[in-house]
Image (cartoon, rainbow, N blue to C red):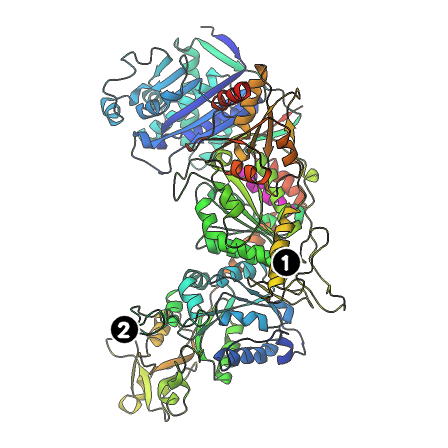
Amino acid sequence: MAEPVALKLTQKDFKSDQEVRWCPGCGDYAILAAVQSFMPELQIPRERTVFVSGIGCSSRFPYYMNTYGMHSIHGRAPAIATGLSVSRPDLSVWVVTGDGDALSIGGNHLIHALRRNVNLKILLFNNRIYGLTKGQYSPTSELGKITKSTPVGSADSPFNPLSLALGAEATFVARTIDSDRKHLQSVLRAAAEHQGSAFVEIYQNCNIFNDGAFETLKDPSTRDEYLIRLEHGQPITFGADGQRCVVHPPGGFGLEVRETASVDPADIVVHDATVAEPAYAFALSRLPGLDLRNTPIGVLRQVQRSSYDERVREQTETAKAKATGSPEDQLAGLLTSGDTWTIL
Amino acid sequence: MTKQVRQLDRVVIRFAGDSGDGMQLTGDRFTSETAQLGNDISTLPNFPAEIRAPAGTLPGVSSFQVHFADYDILTPGDAPNVLVAMNPAALKANIGDLPRGADIIVNTDEFTKRNLTKVGYAVNPLEDGSLDGYALHPVALTSMTIGALADHAVSKKDAERAKNMFALGLLSWMYSRPYESTIRFLERKFASRPELVAANIAAFKAGWNFGETTEDFGVRYEVKPARMRPGTYRNITGNQALSLGLVAAGVRSGLPVFLGAYPITPASDILHELSKHKRFGVTTMQAEDEIAAIGAALGASYGGSLGITTTSGPGVALKGETISLAVALELPLVIIDVQRAGPSTGMPTKTEQADLNMALFGRHGEAPVAVVAPRSPSDCFFAALEASRIALTYRTPVILLSDNYVANGSEPWLLPEVDSLPDLRVEFATEPNGDDGKTFLPYLRDPVTMARPWAIPGTPGLEHRIGGLEKADKTGDISYDPANHDFMVRTRAARIEGIPVPDLEVEDPDGDARTLVLGWGSTFGPIGAACRALRQRGLPIAQAHLRHLSPMPANLGEVLKAYDRVVIPEMNLGQLAHVVRARYLVDAIPYNQVSGLPFTAAKLESMLEEVVKNG
């Protein structure tokens, strides 16, 4: 990532001259504003920031950022961004994608970017619907979802994006919500600081085709009951008065939610995002039910592992360090290597 | 005994055996010895896609043909003068290609009842008189090798495996080849196991000495060095030459090279080769699939690298959407298609030229790209440089159509001076280009090349967004304006059509030919050999060969119209012929072969003779 320099940047500097064309009321506006107002604090010059996207509503994002940007093809942004990031370590490369883009047509590229730990910040706007194609179910739509392409309900089981990323052993996995700017920015901050792939799922409302999908997580009257706000080093309790908590059930594999009053405080899990084994974060990702109760937000996992970029660069630099002579001389040497013969 | 030495001007030898018999290596070594001697050479490996098909079966036969001569040759030869058959399957699979009188050296140890039955020989062909028309040399290769290594500290299995070196020793003696390079090779190959170095050298020498002492081989042959242009040579396959060309393109452009590739036969060797050259700033990425491979290459190009992806036909099909994106983004990208026989998986180790239509037209929308094709193994080096030059200068995807025949075939290559290679340096945009001195217009074109500025991320003041949506002329903003789209589609076509490429040269030594034979890509050798043969017999014929298939040379129409008849031989069902007929309204005669094998010069010669005499 780029070295910080003293820059006087504001939110305005990150706004491009293009008219934003999402539907009025779309959650993407809130995310765009949050990203634009957050970018100055990274102290990375605009020219060294690149947003790469695929196809979908969210993938229009790069047009609105006054940085370098590429609106590419459906599902392929992680692959394209990988080539850019590996060849240009001086850049801060962000991928903006959606649930269809990243998890359906581009699922392969997403998991491979994560397992390689490419130095990318991947923002997945999850609205659990296909918006740009006008309302078909997506790979995160709930089973039985009635849409234009599933008039009697979808027969597909959805992906849990966090579980998927953790299965690929992503080194940074987090979730946040479009409408909670403060939380969103705190997650972006942590993602930006992470070396390697940072995967951030952002619950985003599509007010046209899937309005209110995450309403229980946003409504002040329900959100405290539904959301688990993870904080590193803190016991995991939630509810308006912390009346519920997360424990390791004896003899079980995962984590479970209990009434705080009913458990020994020493048994409450203290959140540690740095646990090397992804099974812990995976167990956190499995807590929510179909009704979104017990949805963890925040950073589930943040571990250090060398990035693909670093490993590739190290190989190149080691090879270059051993080479002597100008590139032309080296090329002449390469051409004449092996069995040669000379005709006079 | 004193052996007679006979001079020959050319010889074609085919080494054939089981996939596990080491025939490719044996052929390679014989080729290298022959190169050292200074003959002109052309080689053709032919092997199954199966890594180890069941031993002793027809599908498991692997062969390597080498043609060498004291003059310049163009093909690996139509028919072998000598067949080395390591087992009954190798004999059966290859006997049909041999002219009567050819030498056949067979490993009699493998002609057991079981092995004969396996390939459907009811009686032993070595004994039933069916090979009477040939010069048959029965040699107990396996048992003699084991015998020669009796005192060596190697297992019986390792001793048996050295039988290919015995065969190589024998052939090296027969054709008076210098063997020092093979000794050095064995010392390198088995450096960690000195006992195998000794055993293989001993097997080689046993084969050599067997030739010298046995009465079965009464004649030894010599093929004098060919008169070749002065300089330093090496023997090179098309895939090796192509890899070196890409490294050279990096050096000559001063840009880092980024290869995104997914393993696929017969292109994987380019990935293997380039992964060895990191010191040149070459990054290779084995991607998760073909689409990611080209995506990563395009991402690297966007960042200022020379982005390259290597594949074969099925991979190009998967990459189509990204090639179209690169057409819209107008970024440099080199796509290498080492063609193989299709459709679908087809015959992955066999050759074909049937991806021309896909290269020219195989994308959605109007998505023109430049297309080039090498004509011979060593020409792959220059074709790679040319593809890179066009990509970098004109900011466009370029498809390079190699094929299995040139990729795995080899020939001597007169090594070029690095300084003589094209200068591929490019200039990235660094300043705003708008009239106001502040605005950057990413789609404002260079008036000469029609290329847009290559403004790479990291350049202050030139921040801009590009994408697959239609762009407004100059500004690059998203545009749905009908007139703009019409303009942009035509501009993208015109800028490819406007790339200057060298005029087509016609070879017609006496200038009296009325028939032109037009080819492209790897058919150059067999077409050239056929034309030479016809001319030697007093039949005039003109030959022209296309390197640039998009855009085509400006004088092509004129050339075509100068002849009464135009014949277009291709290893497909007439793809170039179709384009030529459509574009130039010339009644070209297609001549097609899709057997997975290259044309033989003899077949082309008789076909062209018909046209010249009766056309």
Placement of B419 over or under A129, stated as above or below:
above
- Residues shaded magenta: B239-251
Mark 1 → mark 2, Cα distance in angstroms: 62 Å
Where disc 1 sits, the SS reads helix
| Amino acid type, residue under disc 2 in the picture | Phe
User: Which of the 4 image quarters holds residue A3?
Assistant: bottom right
Q: Which residue is mark 1?
A: B487
Between A275 and B335, which is closer to the camera in this rendering? B335
Q: Position of residue B586 (x, y in %)?
A: 57, 34
Residue B76 percent location from the top left of the image: 50, 25
Q: Give left or right: position of B605 versus A244.
A: right
Which of B523 and B1 lies nearest the eye of the viewer? B523
Residue A253: mark in rendering: 2
Q: Which labelled disc corresponds to residue A232?
A: none
Q: Is residue B610 above or below residue B292?
A: above
Residue A137: x %, y % from top left: 37, 71
| Residue occupying the point 52% across, 17% down | B10
| Residue B275 showing in the rendered view | no
Residue B93 to residue A53: above or below: above
What's the residue type where badge 1 is placed?
A: Phe
Residues packed near mark 2 inside 10 Å, few (<14), some (14 to 19) or many (20 plus): few
Q: What is the quadrant of residue A156 in the picture?
A: bottom left
Task: Indicate whether residue A149 is drawn in magenta.
Answer: no
Q: Residues within 10 Å of mark 1 (few under 14, many from 20)?
A: some
Label the magenta part by its dominant secondary structure.
helix
* Image position of A335 (left or right of B404): right
Instruction: Depth check: give the residue in front, A212 or B175.
Output: A212
